[in-house]
Image (cartoon, rainbow, N blue to C red):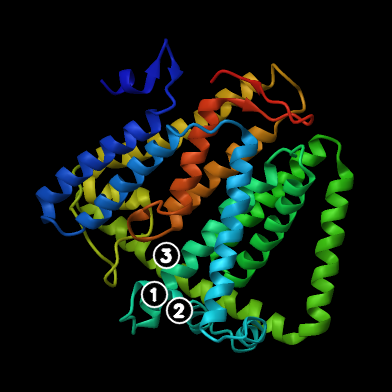
Amino acid sequence: MLPLLIFQNGFKIRIDSILIVLFLWVVWTAVLMNARTGTDGIEIIRMWLVETVFAYTILNCNIKSIISLKVISILSVFVLSLVFVSSAYFAGIDLIGDTLNYILTQDRSHFLYYTLKSTFNAFSPFVTDIDEYNSAVINKLAASYSLLYTVLLFMPKSNSSIINKMNTVAIGLSTVFILLLFSTSSVLMFLFSTLIYAKLRLKQNKLGVIIIMAIIGFVLTSIIIVFAGSDIVDYILYQLDSDIGSRQGRILQYTGALRYIQQSPIFGIGYVTFDGSAVHNWLLFSWIAGGIVSVLLSIIVYFLITAKVVSIKNKISKYEKYNFDLIYLLTALSFIFFVRTMVGGAGGVASGAGMFALAIFLLLSKTGYVFKSNNTQARASS
């Protein structure tokens, strides 16, 4: 039955096959987990179901062109940034001064809380626990900026110079907020996207673009070092040290999860927690909660994503030898999904940026647009 849901017309992979397998994973894991530990942890399964339905909705959107997606992404960056800045203004905060103070004190939880205080109060008037909101908000904001940065980085140029200039500003804003919020996974996604973008431009013999990026990076780094001095160095070291602590916590989760898996590798043992939270890894969560079938369904999702990239790459190469912008973008989007599910939140839920990345990945795979330097778009049937 599963092969019929995944393949069509022989061995051609269906566009929605990834979401079909995700839905099967939700059903199987929910049933088996409920049988072993009751309704504990059902919220994680519910979140996966909501995210899967959300991705299916995006897949069925009618995006007229790649430029439409570009404009939507640009507006998203400006809206996020406007909410951040306006919230600081209405909360009576000097954003520039508090940002510098944040770098000096290295207290990002209080920085974000007081910056977004008016927004928090608007939606949650009785917020008293700073840590309860800040950790989730920091990670989701940083991941959102990383996703938008990735999409905008690979978008083809528009015929409108205004849109192109806005695109450049949006990329700059995204970079600033990614580094300011400093989430490990988001910085990792940012670096990966930047590196494969550089590789793409080298492949297209556009060494000048790489040199300009390197010069801008060097100049900005020099300015920061001159004006911020050792404070910025202390800030970076502190953030790295904080993230090392986070990584150590995940390592303890992963080793503990492996011990649970050894107890019942075939059917799993249901929902378990580590210091009050489910393991932050989708594969390990699947194996513990739903046994070997759940983890195999998770692996199939990863396989289908990779197979779709390879399939589109083979088709695009028939059209234009050096036109691989779409392939590199799809690779970056799939990497974002992988990172969010492997080291993201409890249960590996690809909430927010992770599922958005998968949804855009599927949308681009469905339309099969090949990016063109002259702003036209040829179709490569996927």
How would you rate the neighbour count of disc 3 (Cα within 10 Å): few for under 14, some for 14-19, many for 20 or more? some
Secondary structure found at label 3: helix
Determine the residue positioned at 79% across, 45% down: 161
Q: Can residue 188 be seen at all in this image of the molecule?
A: no
Q: How far apart are marks 2 and 3 (CA)?
A: 36 Å
- Residues 116 and 212: in front is 116
Q: Do the residues labelled 3 and 1 touch (CB within 8 Å)?
A: no
Nearest the eye: 61 or 99? 61
Residue 172 relative to residue 120: left or right: right
At label 3, which amino acid type do we have?
Ile
Point 76% across, 23% down: residue: 321
Residue at image mark 3: 251
Which residue type carries mark 2? Ser
Q: Residue 338 versus residue 141: which sits nearer the camera?
A: 141
* Cα–Cα gap, marks 3 and 1: 37 Å
The image shows residue 308 at horizontal and vertical percentages of 51, 28
- Residue at point 45% right, 68% down? 137
CB-based contact (under 8 Å), mark 1 and mark 2: yes
Task: Determine which residue is flagged by label 2.
Answer: 118
Q: Mark 1 points at which residue?
A: 122
Q: Residue at x 75, y 47 (%)?
A: 164
Kindly indicate the quadrant of the structure image that contains residue 207.
top right
Residue 322: x and y, percent? 77, 27
Disc 1 marks a residue whose amino acid type is: Ala
Which is more foreground, mark 2 or mark 3?
2
Tell me the SS state at disc 2: helix
Q: Local crowd at mark 1 within 10 Å, few (<14), some, or many (≥20)?
A: few
